[in-house]
Amino acid sequence: MNEQALSSLALKDVSLIGFCKYDASPIASLPYAVSIALKLSDAVLSTIADEPTPMYFQHYRTANAILDATAFQLAREIEMLGYNAFPVAASQSLGGEKRYEGFVAHKTVAVLSGLGYVGKSGLLLTREYGSKVRFATVLTDMPVERQRPLIENGCGSCTICKDACPAGAIYGELPGLNGRNFDAELCSRYMKEHFQGIGRGSVCGICIKVCPKNKLR
Ligand code: SF4
Ligand code: SF4
């Protein structure tokens, strides 16, 4: 019931929504989570050849803004139903030595919600859109249950993202759910050193562009 009401609200603005019990929630009193995902534009992604583009950077930021607004709105709706809710922004950093970590692992929540699996690229691959998606999360004490089955990793022996990464940041191996399979610092440093004029690090997009699970229209 809760899931149905939230889905009909959120799916007007985003592409996918999932629900789960999130035992690793950083707020113990909010042990449930809603994962929302927004599909990126195929046309914008097609501007990436072997380096990032300003168009992709701007699109990435707009997608984040839409997700943030939708998570905010969902949290308000959950509060109006009498529960607590905490919207977590699409792009987040704990800062300092933890600058490559977020308050909530959006990908973990998405996996637990049955929206996809973490590929060797470190990106979350959905069945519907591959990794052409951005995510945000809402933590809540409103009981919700996963509505979709968990999805098994489908990378197999593929190493295309590892081979294509200009920073050498992708290990090409599969981790566990919370394991690391790419070096976020290497990725970010490469971006800052080579593409200062485009925007802050980690929006190169090549690992999204080359993944065979992401057939561009
Ligand atoms: S965003 Fe670019 S540099 Fe970073 S892991 Fe992906 S391909 Fe490598
Ligand atoms: S490029 Fe291949 S190995 Fe990398 S995430 Fe996509 S399917 Fe997995």
Image (spheres, helix red, strand yellow):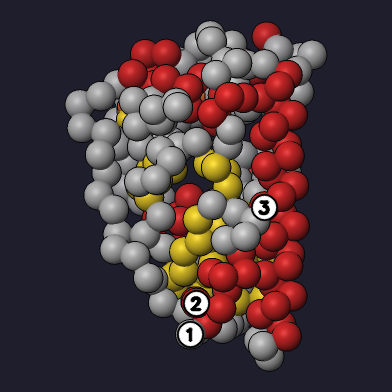
Asked if the residue at tag 1 contacts the one at tag 2, i.e. Cβ–Cβ closer than 8 Å, the answer is: yes
Residue pointed to by mark 3: 67
Q: Which residue was labeled with disc 1?
A: 1
Q: Which amino acid is tagged 3? A: Leu
How far across and down, in percent of the image, does residue 6 sit?
57, 73
Q: Nearer the viewer, residue 119 or 169?
A: 119
Q: Is residue 121 above or below residue 54?
A: below
Q: How far is the residue under mark 2 from the one under mark 1?
A: 5 Å
Q: Is mark 1 within 8 Å of ligand 2?
A: no
Residue at the bottom extreme of this rendering = 82
- Residue 92 position (above or below residue 160): below
Q: Is residue 12 left or right of residue 156?
A: right
What number is the disc on residue 96?
Answer: none
- The percent coordinates of residue 129 (x first, y second) are 43, 41
| Image quadrant, ligand 2 | top left
Q: Could you tell me how far apart the alpha carbons at marks 3 and 2 are, in whole angstroms?
A: 19 Å
Whether residue 103 appears in this view of the structure is: no
**Could you say where residue 165 lies in the image, as x and y percent from the top left?**
46, 16
Q: Which image quarter is the C terminus in? A: top left
Question: Amino acid type of disc 2?
Answer: Gln
Q: Upstream in the sequence, badge 3 or badge 2?
A: 2
Q: Secondary structure at mark 3?
A: helix
Residue drawn at the location 69% of the way across and 44% of the way down: 64
